[in-house]
Amino acid sequence: MVVRPYKTRTVFPDLTNRVIYLNEYLIDDEEVVEYLTLRKLMHIKLNMYPSRYGGNLTCAEKFDSILHLFMPKEK
């Protein structure tokens, strides 16, 4: 993971070099970094193996179901 200042980007991957770039202006605490990293990894995984994660679910439903496995909904 590489942390740099960006004007418009939050988190983005470089799949060729296997690096995730994170905007340093968004780092408030560890939980924010964990959430942004998890989101990006989930997007990569869902795009690589789309049919594996629930055939009848929408993309948003798949994403939410996986996200809440790692980060439970807050009350």
Image: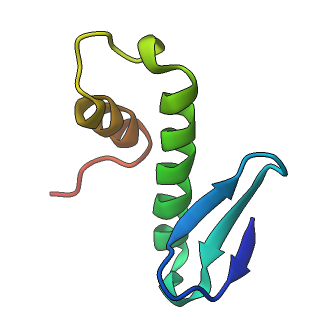
Tell me where residue 71 appears, x and y as whole percent.
39, 49
Residue 28 visible in the current orientation = no
Q: Quadrant of residue 5?
A: bottom right
Image quadrant in which you'd find residue 66: top left
The residue located at (73%, 46%) in the rendering is 15
56 or 74: nearer the eye?
56
Q: Is residue 12 above or below residue 32?
A: above
Return the residue found at the far right: 17
Q: Is residue 47 above or below residue 16?
A: above
Task: Please identify the quarter of the rendering in which residue 61 is found.
Answer: top left
How many marks on residues? 0
Residue furthest left as drawn: 75
In the displayed structure image, the side of residue 36 where residue 63 appears, left or right = left
Residue 52 is situated, as x and y percent measured from the top left of the image, at 46, 12
Residue drawn at x 49%, y 83% is 26
Can you say whether 59 is above or below 35 in the image?
Answer: above
Q: Which residue corresponds to the image point at 46% horizontal and 71% vertical from the top-left?
A: 32
Give me the residue at 53% from left, 89% from top: 25
Q: Is there any visible trace of residue 65 in the rendered image?
A: yes
- Direction from residue 70 to residue 22 in the image, left or right: right
Work out whether residue 49 or residue 64 is closer to the camera in this orientation and state it: 49
Q: Quadrant of the C terminus?
A: bottom left
The image position of residue 56, as x and y in percent, is 23, 11
What colour scheme has been applied to the protein in the rendered image? rainbow
* Quadrant of the rendering where the N terminus is positioned: bottom right
Q: Position of residue 65 (x, y in %)?
A: 30, 32
Q: Is residue 62 above or below residue 25?
A: above
